[in-house]
Image (tube, grey):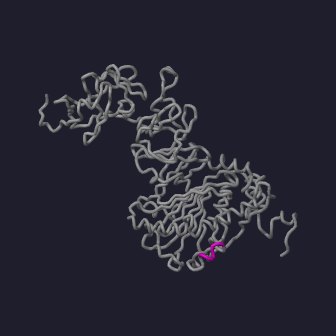
Amino acid sequence: MPARNAKQWEKVPGKISSGEYVDSRIYSDRDIFEEEITKIFSKVWMPVCHESELPDPYSFRTMTVAREPVLVVRGADNQIRAFLNVCPHRGNMLENRPSGSFEEASPSGAPKHITCMFHAWQFDMKGNCAHISRATEGYQDRLECKDVGLRRLRCEVKYGGFVWVTLNDGIGQTVEEWAGGAFDCMQKSLDAEPLEVFHYHKAIIPCNYKLWHDTNSEFYHDYLHYHNRVTGFNDSYFARKNIGFDNGHVNVGSFEVQYDEYEGFESREELSFPHLPTNHWEMIDFFPGVNFNLRGSALRCDIMTPLGPDKVMIEFRGLGLKRDTPEERLTRQRHHNSIWGPFGRNLHEDLLAVTTQQATMSEWADKRRILHGRHELDADGDPTIHDEEGMRHFYDAWGQWMDRWPGDPDLSYEEGQKRKAA
Amino acid sequence: MSDATDTAWQQICSATDINDGELKRFETGQFAVVVARVGDEFRVIPPFCPHMAEPLHESGICRGGALTCSKHLWQWNLLTGEEQGPAERPLVFYESEIRDGDIWARVDQELVYEFDEEDDDDFEW
């Protein structure tokens, strides 16, 4: 097969059809990135943390959703609520710390209150304004506490205790409706008993967030992992199915891993998550940038916060059962870290792929086609994980949210579909 | 004077521990109290401001018989507990007396102010 000149390089290769590739600009174009923030990330449900990170009444956690600062608190009634982390007075960020408690008084504020350090306006855990400094003197009767509550955000605790938030008041869907059945594969395991975060690290990676999602969506890149995996996996690894759900979510079917065949590994049987068959592995690629990964004894959740077209922050959480004994917890952590810890077998390998992909796709590079045209069905006619249905399913949802055709983002979704039909 | 054998009463501190115009916090075992002094009179109060539960031993200022919480300027007549200025609730006292130069208070039951949060059951999206 000869190399190609510029004109040949621009053509769609072979008999790949529209809908089986994306234009590389969707990974590098600044305008498209801005649109993803406004049209997708500010419109959907995103998990932002786990309820075990808010252990007591008045615990809080801060983060961003679609670049808006968000504050999540646990109230005296144990309910978790989310607000914009913005003071209604002069727009100051209410809380700068990543986590902590409002139980004790701050130097300028009352205990059990959120206090803006700028002018000491204070708010309770329900977002009510509780104090405006020098209110009568400054505002007479023109502005009262009842007029300046915090901006509350829709918030649900769902699927093993994850805290979900959306900026979109009018989303019209619960988290369960949004998931569209994608959690059916692991909900019983996640909701059997309380979970707890035992591992957290975050990384800022020089790649588009979708490239990380892509690597989680196809599984024949085990050419990359081959040296580590040749012993532990078996034919059933590749016989797994990619199952799509409404709204762009994908479930990667489970199989039994031969952990004891891995050099240096052991069976995860003893600490299996409830209801999960021994040593099995369930995974959900959740639209638009979350991954839930349940392997035997440990749950991993990656939450992606896009920072730019070529930059993503990924927060990695590892979870176990809240009732773990210290010994069980150590074993679970070892199981988790040996694959997914910063020095585990998995993450750095995926990292190598996504960063070198991004390196070829700078915003100054020529546009080119990134293929996801593999179709490999099993005997029942369902897509296996060799099949790139996971990515096609994701990009179809992406195209609808963006009203752009992923294979040619200059076209609307409808125009792209027409071209595909033609 | 109360019955000295009454176990509901506890010795909180010595009168000489506190200067005129001073507020000090003490632990009784179950909970904390603040002792305030106006001339030769003493008052034993809960350690929180009735407004927003500010810790009064830090935020309180005691001058000329008045207690002022410096956080939001609620103020009381320290001898009677009556509100002054913007304060909207009176100060409450533990029953107390001086016995042989020590401050004793009846602390069998903690005095607490209710700090109700507004409900948000009717929150509309």
In the picture, measured across the screen, residue B99 lies left or right of residue A140, that is left
Q: Position of residue A69 (x, y in %)?
A: 57, 43
Please state the horizontal and vertical placement of residue B110, each as a whole percent of the image.
26, 37
Q: Quadrant of the N terminus of chain A?
A: bottom right
Depth check: A411 or B81 in front? B81
Q: Residue at x 83, y 63 (%)?
A: A10
Residue B16 in the figure: left or right of residue A55:
left
Q: Confirm whether the magenta stretch covers residue A226.
A: yes
Q: Count of labels shown?
A: 0
Which of the 4 quarters of the picture holds residue A103?
Answer: top left
Q: What is the magenta range?
A: A224-228
Q: Residue at x 85, y 74 (%)?
A: A2
Toward the front, the furthest residue is B16
Query: Is A410 displayed left or right of A244 in the figure?
Result: right
Q: What's the magenta bit mostly, secondary-structure-wise? A: helix
In the depicted structure, whether residue A280 falls above or below residue A109: below
Q: Quick one: quadrant of the C terminus of chain A?
A: bottom right
Frontmost residue, A355 versus B33: B33
